[in-house]
Amino acid sequence: MLQLKIDNIHAYFRIMRLDRPIGIYLLLWPTLWSIFITSFTSFGEGLPPITITMVFIFGVILMRSAGCVINDFADRDFDGQVERTKTRPLATGEITTVEALQLFALLIISSFILVLQLNWQTVVLSIAAVGLASLYPFMKRYTHLPQVVLGAAYSWSIPMAAMAIMSSLPYWIWLLYAANLCWTVAYDTQYAMVDRNDDVKVGIKSTAILFGRFDLLAVMILQITALVLLAITYHLLDLSWPAYAGLIAALLLFSQQWRNTKNRDRDACFQAFLDNHWVGMVIAASIAAATFIQW
């Protein structure tokens, strides 16, 4: 029996984090990297297909919302013990577990209807996307590397977009995938640093705990690796100078994060996580500019 209630819509918005769209941005920007680059490579026009672009934009919103719902379902017995998450709807009882699972199913079904507008190869890839999004929240119980699983999930739209546009997966798309995976692990480690003390108490694992006193160094290495992989991809595709200018701007933004988080202050780490929105946007804009110039 359907238990979703219209008078509980505010709580549903909150469990989907629609009031905190940072996750949408962090998933959207790499998707646009792939769309911009593959459109230029495939058609030589530098202009992404409107229908495919809109499908991915709405798909990002739905899948990120679904990921948040299943994350809160997985963490329902822990969120009440963590300062930052104790007011989440499942932790406070505003939403039941049945409502959460039904909402998750509705979001996944809606996403699948969207992806059916694309070619069959992309539909097949979308199955892995659902698997990765569903797996991530539960990995915090078994490994200190849940951020890697999140990176795999948050990067999966890159090969999906390439397949939707090109009907194939060129080898360089996996360099783009690896770059985003490294970046995702870096910013989600910053996020995990905020909750590290609480996570240790309740038994949740993370890269922030795994890296220990080398956490900031690990974040720096991952961020630089992401930029190097992007530069290699640009070189292979012979992208013009704005793309590289975007990497320089991203490096400057990263350096600001390094300065601000050097004392590991919780608020500073959380702000650094949020500031990665600007990194993704700068890279997306620079790729768009590079492909436009070449067009």
Image (spheres, grey):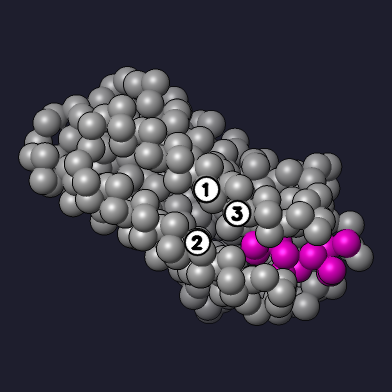
Residue at which label 1 appears: 224
* Residue at the image position 77 percent from the left and 78 percent from the top: 83
Helix, strand or loop under label 3 = helix
Task: Look at label 3 and name its amino acid.
Answer: Met
Residue stretch rendered in magenta on the structure: 190-200
Q: Is residue 129 above or below residue 241?
A: above
> Is residue 172 in view from this perspective?
yes
Which residue is found at the position 88% from the left and 62% from the top? 200
Quarter location, residue 143: top right
Pick the front one: 100 or 142: 142
Whether label 3 touches label 1, CB < 8 Å: yes
Q: Residues within 10 Å of mark 1 (few under 14, many from 20)?
A: many
Can residue 78 be seen?
no
The residue type indicated by label 1 comes to Ile
What type is the residue that disc 2 sits on?
Phe
Q: Which residue is mark 2?
A: 254
- CB contact under 8 Å: marks 2 and 1: yes
Residue 87: quarter of image: bottom right
Q: Which residue is mark 3?
A: 220
Badge 2 or badge 1: first in the primary sequence: 1
Residue 282 is inside the magenta segment? no
Figure label count: 3
Marks 2 and 3, how far apart at CA: 8 Å
